Amino acid sequence: MLMRLTEPFLWRYLRSPNPTVRRNTLHLLVSAFPLQDPEGSKELGEQTLQKQLSILEEMMFDECPEVR
């Protein structure tokens, strides 16, 4: 359920030009990591996990130190 609630804005806000928005959204992702849909297929779960890991890796190299 948490996955369905956060998915519409999570990926979009992690790409926001505003560093405060990225930082707050990253905090949400890290707090709920790993987001999983128990009703989804195993393949979808693996794709979602990979997407989350990729985002976390990208955020470690963010231009804004507060996001890193």
Image (cartoon, grey):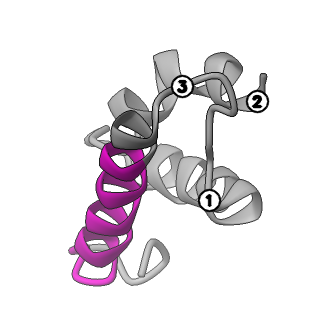
Instruction: Give the residue displayed 53% in from the left and 59% down from the top.
Output: 23
Q: The N terminus appears in which quarter of the rendering?
A: top right
Instruction: Using the rendered view, name the quadrant where residue 33 is placed.
Output: bottom right
Q: Mark 1, residues whose alpha carbon is within 10 Å: few (<14), some, or many (≥20)?
A: some
Q: Secondary structure under badge 3?
A: loop
- Report, in whole angstroms, how far the alpha carbon at label 2 lies from the one at label 3: 13 Å
**Residue 48 horizontal side relative to residue 63, left or right:** right
Asked if 42 appears above or below 53 in the picture, the reply is above
Of label 3 and label 1, which has the lower sequence position? 1
Of label 2 and label 1, which has the lower sequence position? 2
Q: Mark 3, residues whose alpha carbon is within 10 Å: few (<14), some, or many (≥20)?
A: few
Q: Mainly helix, strand or loop, the magenta region?
A: helix
- Report, in whole angstroms, how far the alpha carbon at label 2 lies from the one at label 1: 11 Å
**Residue 24 horizontal side relative to residue 63, left or right:** right
Magenta-drawn stretch contains 65: no
Magenta stretch in the rendered image: 46-63
In this figure, what is the number of numbered marks? 3
Q: Secondary structure under badge 1?
A: loop
**Residue identifier under label 2:** 2
Instruction: Give the residue displayed 49% in from the left and 16% down from the top.
Output: 8
Residue 62: x %, y % from top left: 25, 73
**Residue identifier under label 1:** 34
What is the three-letter code of the residue carrying label 2?
Answer: Leu
**Residue identifier under label 3:** 40
Instruction: Give the residue displayed 51% in from the left and 52% down from the top.
Output: 20
What is the three-letter code of the residue carrying label 3?
Answer: Gly
- Report, in whole angstroms, how far the alpha carbon at label 3 lies from the one at label 1: 14 Å
Q: The C terminus appears in which quarter of the rendering?
A: bottom left
Q: Mark 2, residues whose alpha carbon is within 10 Å: few (<14), some, or many (≥20)?
A: few
Residue 64's label in the rendered image is: none
What is the three-letter code of the residue carrying label 1?
Answer: Pro
- Pick the front one: 2 or 17: 2
